[in-house]
Amino acid sequence: SQDAEEQGLTEDTLVLDFLDQAGVTERLSRPGTQDVAINRPFEIWVDGPEGWVREDAPWLTYSLCWRLANALCALNYRVLAPHSPIHTVELPGGERGQIVMAPACQKGTLSMTFRKPSLQRFTHKDYINSGRYDRAEAIASPILTLKAWQRDMQEAHAAGDWDRFMEIAVAHRQNIIVFGGPGSGKTTYGKTLIDLFPAHRRMVTIQEILEDTLPFHPNHVHLLYGHVVAPKALVASALRMKPDHLFLAELTGDEVWHFIEILNTGTKGTVTTAHANDSEAGYARVCGLVKQSEVGKGLDYAYI
């Protein structure tokens, strides 16, 4: 109907106006921009040719963030509220957005991540000519052969050179699980390891209580779970927030399978914790948590 069309036009216009006011439109239109992220008021992060770059945005108040997020959700027939704080939206220009508000993130912040779709299309010949196949290798032997950096880790381990050991692990995006009992210092040690990650990378944490504030990594978003939002929902949301690294503070339940899947789909390199008597017992602990998920119920322990 005409009224519906006018309503849609009004909502489109409102969203476009808020996107302009927030500074999102101009940044998405820059050549080479892939993503634009708002982690908190008064700053915008742009992922372009130089990687993630922070820009001051003194005009970007919490009120403006809220109006933009609310208008985007309304445009996509969604309700943004404390009882439904996570939404995937489409912008009028076709870009995708991911919106997270409290209590699923820090109070006083509102996370918005906008992905600019690629309009490029290549022929298969283009890929061949680009040299992307030059690194292809045929792997025929089932025998495990350690790479040079893995041998370096072995040597560092044997020598007790733990600085070097962890430096290599972080550089090669290894996934680290810290096992221990209650009060054993898992979280404190985990924070120490996270501090070793490069400061320029984009970090997303998932925590029940905000314990790790990431003081050395300015491009960060803290997602918080509780009675409104389960860890599994935050793990799924984080995948749409363009993290270089995703840190789940503690492995506790059926979110573990989804977390492992994310680590195996381009977001490797994490530090997490779990309750277990020791590292050997930790394997059984993680397997048990995976079995709590719907997918995990059908998997045997050998596969996990």
Image: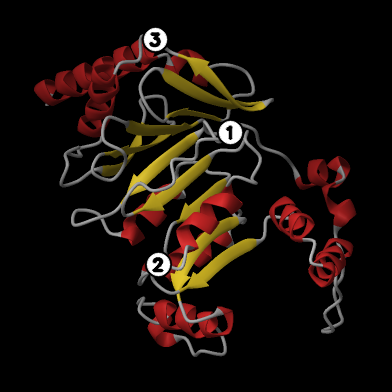
Q: How many numbered circles are shown?
A: 3
Mark positioned earlier in the residue sequence (3 or 2): 3
Q: Residue at x 36, y 17 (%)?
A: 19
Residue 153 image point, x, y percent: 81, 65
Label 2–label 1 contact, CB within 8 A = no
Label 3–label 1 contact, CB within 8 A = no
Q: Quadrant of the N terminus?
A: top left
Q: Left or right? Give the position of 182 relative to 286.
A: left
Residue behind mark 1 = 118
Q: Residue at x 41, y 24 (%)?
A: 93
* Dot label at residue 236: none
Residue 206 image point, x, y percent: 40, 52
Residue 97 image point, x, y percent: 39, 35
Residue behind mark 3 = 58
Residue behind mark 2 = 183
* Element carrying mark 1: loop
Residue type (three-letter) at the residue carrying disc 3: Pro
